[in-house]
Amino acid sequence: MKSEIIAELERVKGAAPDGLLHAESVLEAARSADSPLHGRFEWDDARAAEGYRLGQARTLIAAAIIMEPRLGEPIRAYVSLTPDRANGGGYRGTGEVLDSAGLRRILLADALREIEVLARRYSTLHELASVWALAASLKSKLIEETTQPLAS
């Protein structure tokens, strides 16, 4: 992120009575066309409203839960796989993904990438080092398996 954006965020945070950075304060600071934050927002109300509703639709899809009889527990009804996001977006039924060796492998790779993001975010928490090591080991195993033919 550009240093002028970080500087502006720090300025907004420093002006807060509680010393916290609040989304409402960032938005208020960004309203000025002179703010380095201004260009990071959609100011056309119709487009912003449509974007907000799309976010609500994504939240609705993510919150859909079904009972998975094979697991005996509730799971998300839909998942978004990286290749689908790269091609305009969309969600697949979780059961469909779990029943396909290829799609399941993609879901596993996506999960491991998300764990890597968490590992970077929380790398200062040494108490979680064994979790990150296990994830790295699983990723290595997955990479080894991708050189072998899929068994459907």
Image: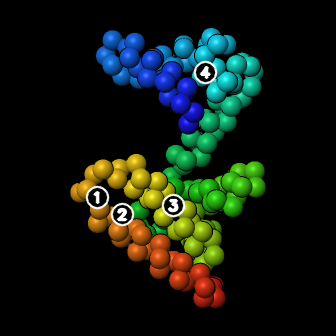
Identify the residue at image location x=40%, y=68%: 135
Marks 1 and 2 in Cβ contact (< 8 Å): yes
Rounded to the nearest angstrom, the CA distance separating label 1 from label 4 is 36 Å
Rounded to the nearest angstrom, the CA distance separating label 3 from label 4 is 31 Å
| Three-letter code, disc 4 | Pro
SS of the residue under disc 2:
helix
In front of the other: label 1 or label 4? 4
| Three-letter code, disc 1 | Leu
- Which mark is first along the chain, 4 or 1? 4
| Three-letter code, disc 3 | Arg
Residue 128 is marked as 1
Residue 113 is marked as 3
Compared to 106, does 86 lie above or below? above
In front of the other: label 3 or label 4? 4
Q: Which of the image's four quarters has the C terminus?
A: bottom right
Residue 132 is marked as 2
Marks 1 and 4 in Cβ contact (< 8 Å): no
Identify the residue at image location x=54%, y=83%: 145
Q: Is there any visible trace of residue 75 in the rendered image?
A: no
Compared to 141, does 52 lie above or below? above
- Which mark is first along the chain, 3 or 1? 3
- Looking at the picture, tell me which residue is in the foreground, 6 or 66: 6
